[in-house]
Image: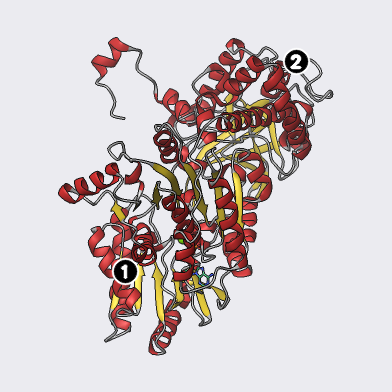
Amino acid sequence: MPEAPASVSATASKPKSAPRKAMERLGLVRDIDLALHLPLRYEDETQLTRIAAAREGDTVQCEGEVIASRIELRGRRQLLVTIEDESGELLLRFLNFYPSQQKQMAQGQRLRVRGELRGGFFGREMVHPVVKAVDDDTPLAQALTPVYPAGAGLPQSYLRKAIEASLKRAPLEELLPPRTVPPQLPALREALHFLHHPPPRVPLSTLEDHTHPAWQRLKFEELLAQQLSQLKAQRERAHLKAPALRARREGLPEQLLRHLPFQLTGAQQRVVEEVAQDLALPQPMHRLLQGDVGSGKTVVAALAAAVCMDAGWQCALMAPTEILAEQHFRKLIAWLEPLGIQVAWLTGSVKGKARQKMLDAVASGEANLVVGTHAVIEDKVSFAKLGLAVVDEQHRFGVAQRLALRKKLASQALEPHLLMMSATPIPRTLAMTYFADLDVSTIDELPPGRSPIVTKVFGDAKRDEVIAKIRDAVEQGRQVYWVCPLIEESEALDLKNATDTHAELSAALAGQPVGLLHGRMPPGEKAAVMAQFSEGATKVLVATTVIEVGVDVPNASLMVVEHAERFGLSQLHQLRGRVGRGAVASVCVLLYTGPLSDTGKSRLKAMAETTDGFEIARRDLDIRGPGEFMGTRQSGAELLRFADLQEDAPLLKAARALAPRLLDEHPEAARRQVERWLGGKAEFLKA
Ligand code: ADP
Ligand code: MG
């Protein structure tokens, strides 16, 4: 949002300081939000350690008088300050410093310093300790000092003061009726005060691993709010009406099945049946169809669409990118047009008269099936009779888009059914907790005739060798993807990278045409490049992550991912799913540039060890934690901040048991509980 000019904002409201804006970005707006913003860890400033008694590796607080202060060149310019207490001496070393700091630490000054004690080359030292100038009688802290999660531009001292003030004002009265909270847990107000200011000598370990009863209380509260909001959404949905959709005998679905070039797998038959049963009910379906990449979700969507259209209703299918939407479009046209279905195409790039024509066809009901990107849910598109909306790769749809979709769907007298598809499977515990409001169908079987993918991880020193392998593969008539990473916040660099690689491969494969596909190309050009590759006219396709989802070229059997360390685990899995679609054995080469972070290492290891999407999802969960797993980064809405679904299973169980009782017997308390914890975010949980 552009900022208001200073003169206007000064009269309208007080201009916001930078730290206040940083707090808002973290969702810290109301007093209660701040009160519930809990420390990551604590610093113990309640005690002093004698210099001689401090052990190397410990983070300690010492106090002493400056006996020497000098600037020296030891490789680089640095400030060296020696302090002394009655037990010994300690060297403080600063590689970056201001003249004012040097002055503050002048000889004779008494300093209280806090930092990690190290055994340096020149004796025991602290590098960049926290320093405070003190007198003989400056008191020690009375409670442990909290360290809060904060972002750039938000100093701890500012945040501490803000939280302190909010904690006094926030409404923290007990909302839960007596005897509903697990008995060993303290009251909320008590728990919060304790966690923000633990008294000295509380064992830090129980605070830091969140096993302390005060933490348990907070986690219980959070889980309860989350369960309540889910339950409410579920109950609200039960009151909604949808058209009951049933296909006629010998209708479209049966015709489509006869027309397909393959037989459905057992798993596909099962989920098609589950979806058909939902569609036949007069309540809106709210179902997630999950299945690994290549498991054949598209045909399930086509069959659901066929049921819907056979019953005389319209259907919309949305994909997150134009390329993917276009693939669906081509496939659905091939399957459905021979059966007399009119398929309309709608994306942001369809403009002018063509667009108006589409919109008219959709509004009149003449178009039975609309395929496109999220342009399909834009305000201007209105359906005559929408019976079913299918969202493909739903994890790639932003939360805001999903909310827009639900709003749109709710604008008819009868709500349409909703089928979401995802190749990023959600582990069962997560599905249960986050999606109490969602039914889940799983395709747990790949179509026959697929050969397993071998994954190899190489440092980028092997790049030339890999290029030689590509030449061999191309000579054998195989097709190759070369994926270039997204360089964060620099589309231009990203593009240069892909263009350079394209030139390099073209030179190495003299005579063989190499395709180039990136996000900046106009959609028509993208489609042309993709079509050439699908037809086999180009053997090698250099692409940025635009090919990540859904692209289907069975002859492609080698993939190279450059800078694999920059991709997320599920993204790598999605990419890899582009090969291994035909009968030839496929290879995926992950090239990385070191040094690797720990999480980078775990991701590449997981990729090398398994191709099972569910196992990948489990590992991803381990590496990232559930909050981030659910794609909260894109929405900015944290779902669970404190509780861990696995570790806190007993609390989760208690919260699940209490939620329906509270909603039935104390609806006002239930409402306030959700409001307290989720505030404006409750909507996000339904998306
Ligand atoms: P995804 O689940 O990743 O969206 P797709 O729907 O794109 O997978 O299917 C992958 C490929 O498998 C497509 O070429 C599709 O036509 C094909 N396919 C789907 N089901 C079957 C089946 N039962 N037998 C053989 N091929 C199938
Ligand atoms: Mg797909």
At a point 30% along the width and 50% down the height, the residue shown is 367
Q: Mark 2 points at which residue?
A: 177
Q: Which disc number belongs to residue 203?
A: none
Q: Which amino acid does label 2 sit on?
A: Pro
The answer to whether one can see residue 322 in this image is yes
Q: Which of 282 and 537 is in front in this view?
A: 282
At a point 51% along the width and 22% down the height, the residue shown is 158
Task: Classify mark 1: helix, strand or loop.
Answer: helix
In the image, residue 393 above or below residue 541: above
Q: Nearer the viewer, residue 177 or 131?
A: 177
In the image, residue 300 above or below residue 626: below
Q: In this view, does 61 lie to the left or right of 468?
A: right
Q: Which amino acid does label 1 sit on?
A: Met
Q: In this view, does 22 lie to the left or right of 205?
A: left
Q: Which residue lies furthest to the front in this view?
A: 249
Colouring mode (rainbow / by chain / secondary structure / one colour): secondary structure
Residue 66, given in percent of the width and then of the height, sits at: 60, 30
Q: Which disc number belongs to residue 530?
A: 1
Alpha carbon separation for disc pair 2 and 1: 61 Å
| Label 2 Cα crowd, 10 Å radius (few <14 / some 14-19 / many 20+) | few
Residue 237, given in percent of the width and then of the height, sits at: 55, 32
Residue 567, given in percent of the width and then of the height, sits at: 48, 58
Which quadrant, please, contains the N terminus? top left
Task: Classify mark 2: helix, strand or loop.
Answer: loop
Contact between labelled residues 1 and 2, with CB atoms less than 8 Å apart: no
